Image (cartoon, rainbow, N blue to C red):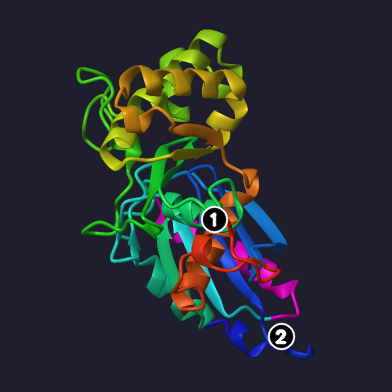
Amino acid sequence: MVDFGLGLVGRTRVTSSLCLALDIGATKLGAALVDRRGDIRCSAKRHTPEGCDPEMLFSEVTNLLDGLLESEVESPLALGVGSPGPVKDRSEVSPLNIPAWRGFPLRRRLEDRYGLATFVELDTKALALAEGWTGAARGRRNYLAMVVSTGIGGGLVLDGRLVEGRTGNAGHVGHVVVCPEGRPCSCGGRGCLEAEASGWAIAVITGRPPREATSEVIEHTGQLVGQALASVATLCDLDLVVVAGSVALGFGAPFFRAAVSALHDYATQDYTRQTQVVPAGLGARAPLVGAAAVAWRGLGEREETPWEATTADGCEPER
């Protein structure tokens, strides 16, 4: 085991105000040291290795974390992880878009290696924490935070609390069916939003990467996302949807206009008419800030959810 909790040889340990954050993605791995305000002290990233070797992927993760920890005098208090789902018991991960890990005991393996209290959560639930803490959903109590990237997922906040569900996998908006007779999905279903509007789906359907998408593809993707959001907003009485991810943010304003239009075309109840769809406020920082929020929450320092905590200057956020 590499014991970073004792500080680095030849350096003086100081009282820690940092958590270590790890974001697992289908195409890249990210890590950062994040303070109690949600500010990133330092960060690093690597490409996610292809293939089905679980140890090769874990080795890339530890190489990433090792390099980051060796560059910092201050030792972190805990490690927070955001991973694509499903996640079992906040410990084992089986990301649909990362075939190397099926039932991989990520929490135990990281705790064994680093000796840090480790907390694992769905990456999109981590996003919801981040955006409610310091992002576009700050002060909101009923919202969905979603990612439209290689895959599609979401984290749901109702009455100021992150919704967990029976197994901790609540919020999987990517597997809301938008085309009942549509394309097969990696989850085993058919016509899921992820199978029709995610980055990998766009690449398969069009033969081009999302960055080369035509205006028609961008608009269609936004319409499908808005259709799915109409169901979620109607069911959960949301006033806000915060959208992150390389596809959504890369497509920009035309995507968001199409999503808002479709949402209100399909969700016609009075209480859904004011539901907003906005870009994530934290941009590319959101996954790592979210993973850090998972760690702070796990330590009990954020038993109150981030959007209920006081701000850095001691003032209460708007409600």
- Is 296 above or below relative to 81? below
Q: Position of residue 305 (x, y in %)?
A: 46, 65
Q: What residue type is disc 2 on?
A: Leu
Q: Earlier in the sequence, mark 1 or mark 2?
A: 2
Q: Which residue is mark 1?
A: 130
Q: What residue type is disc 1 on?
A: Ala
Left or right: residue 232 compared with residue 203: left
Left or right: residue 252 compared with residue 58: right
The residue tagged with tag 1: helix, strand or loop?
helix
- Is 206 above or below relative to 249? above
Q: Residues within 10 Å of mark 2 (few under 14, many from 20)?
A: some
Q: Position of residue 318 (x, y in %)?
A: 57, 55
Q: Answer yes or no: is residue 183 visible.
A: yes
What range of the chain is rendered magenta? 52-74
Residue 56 counted in the magenta span: yes
Q: Residue at x 30, y 58 (%)?
A: 164
Q: Which residue is mark 2?
A: 8
Q: Answer yes or no: is residue 186 visible.
A: no
Q: Residue at x 48, y 33 (%)?
A: 276
Q: Position of residue 59 (x, y in %)?
A: 52, 63
- Name the mark on residue 36: none
Q: Residue at x 49, y 50 (%)?
A: 140
Determine the CA span between mark 1 and mark 2. 30 Å
